[in-house]
Structures are given as C-alpha cells and as structure tokens.
Image (tube, grey):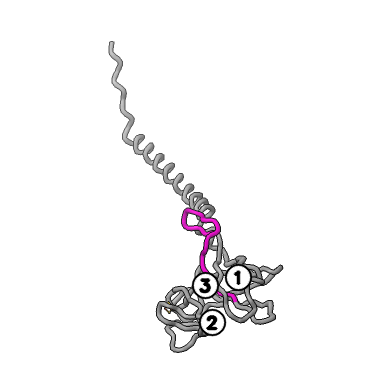
C-alpha cells in the first residue's frame, strides 16, 4: 500500500516562518552596520591621517646661511591616500630664512595663496615671484602691490632643537584672504 502524500504546512505557518527569517536578517544587519563603521574608522588611512598638523624635520640649522636670503627645502613625510601608504616622499616645500648671527628661523610655504602655484625666489631683485599670475612678495612673505594674491605668503611655525630645524607643516586654502588650514 502506497504512503500517503505529505501534507503541506498551513499558510499561517509559512508566513510565520518568513516573518521570523526577515526579523533575523534585519537584526543581523542592524548589528553589523555599526561594527563595520567602527572597522572603517579604524582602518581607513585617510581618517588616521587627518590628525592635527605636526612638526616635520626639514634640515640642519647650519644648512640655512645667516645672510637673510631665503633657501628652499622640500618637506618630506609619509603620505597616505585612501588605501595606500607612501613612505617618505616630498609633500611640499618651504623657504627658510635666517638673519645674521641669529638662531631664529622664519619659515614660509612655497605654495602661492592665489591659486596654489609654486613660488620662486628672485635672488637678483631679492623678492619672491609667482610665475603663474605674477604675484610678488617681499623676502619675509609680504605682498608687493599690485599682486593678485589675496594674502601674504603663508608663514609656518618653526622650531630649532639640537641644531635641527622642524616646521609645522600645513596646507592652506588658496584664493581667499583668510589663512585657513585644510583639514
Ligand atoms: S597662483 Fe600665484 S599668482 Fe596666481
């Protein structure tokens, strides 16, 4: 004699099972989302990089002649983009200046505040010039009028310790009168 055909579960039982399954999936997603966000915050190189600006070693004090004429130095640091770290590469440039007999260093960024071009030193005329739109600056970074730059060259905090010069490196927004550091 043949076995009786299996009896399908009632429609209510199927609906109840589906409701429980959806609740489990939804609950799992709700738990995983904050966990994933926490992992992202921890591992994302951009987020780790966005700490406050720090002092970066630039050169020895004796490498900055005390003749009042600025000298250009690269700013070297580890750099991170969204996913990759690049060890010790140039991220900008600074001009360092020292007056005769002084151990105090003045530092200005070589990035033009007008539109971000690289500012050059004109040794003959003893001034800075930006080749992009002809802004002219004095040796201490002041504007020579008329210049399209909306502000002076960006001064940077500088520290001399144990015969080494370090600069607090920051990038500033260009094209505006205020000196505002990029995050
Ligand atoms: S970018 Fe320097 S003057 Fe325009």
Tell me residue 67's x, y (percent). Answer: 62, 80
Residue 59 marker: none
The reply to whether the magenta stretch includes residue 128 is: no
In this view, the residue in front, 79 or 178, is: 79
Tell me residue 132's x, y (percent). Answer: 41, 77
In this view, the residue in front, 9 or 75, is: 75
Q: In the rendered image, which residue does mark 1 sit on?
A: 167
- Judged left or right of residue 25, residue 102 is right
Q: In the rendered image, which residue does mark 3 sit on?
A: 181
Q: In the rendered image, which residue does mark 2 sit on?
A: 141
Q: Secondary structure at mark 1?
A: strand
Region of the chain picked out in magenta, as a range: 78-96
Up/down of 82 relative to 175, above or below? above
Label 1 crowd bin: few (<14), some (14–19), many (20+), radius 10 Å: many
Tell me residue 20's x, y (percent). Answer: 41, 40
First in sequence: mark 2 or mark 3? Answer: 2
First in sequence: mark 1 or mark 2? Answer: 2
């Amino acid at each position: 004699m043949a076995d009786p055909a299996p009896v399908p579960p009632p429609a209510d039982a199927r609906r109840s099972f589906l409701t429980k399954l959806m609740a489990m999936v939804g609950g799992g997603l709700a738990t995983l989302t904050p966990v994933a966000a926490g992992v992202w915050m921890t591992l994302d190189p951009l987020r780790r990089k966005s700490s406050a600006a720090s002092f970066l070693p630039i050169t020895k004090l004796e490498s900055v002649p005390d003749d009042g004429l600025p000298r250009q130095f690269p700013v070297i640091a580890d750099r991170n983009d969204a996913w990759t770290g690049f060890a010790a590469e140039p991220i900008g440039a600074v001009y360092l200046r020292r007056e005769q007999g002084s151990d105090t260093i003045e530092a200005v960024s070589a990035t033009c505040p007008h539109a971000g071009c690289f500012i050059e030193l004109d040794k003959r005329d003893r001034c800075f010039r930006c080749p992009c739109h002809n802004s002219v600056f004095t040796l201490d970074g002041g504007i020579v009028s008329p210049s399209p730059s909306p502000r002076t060259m960006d001064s940077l905090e500088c520290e001399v310790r144990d015969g080494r010069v370090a600069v607090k490196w920051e990038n500033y927004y260009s094209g505006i009168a205020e000196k505002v550091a990029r995050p």
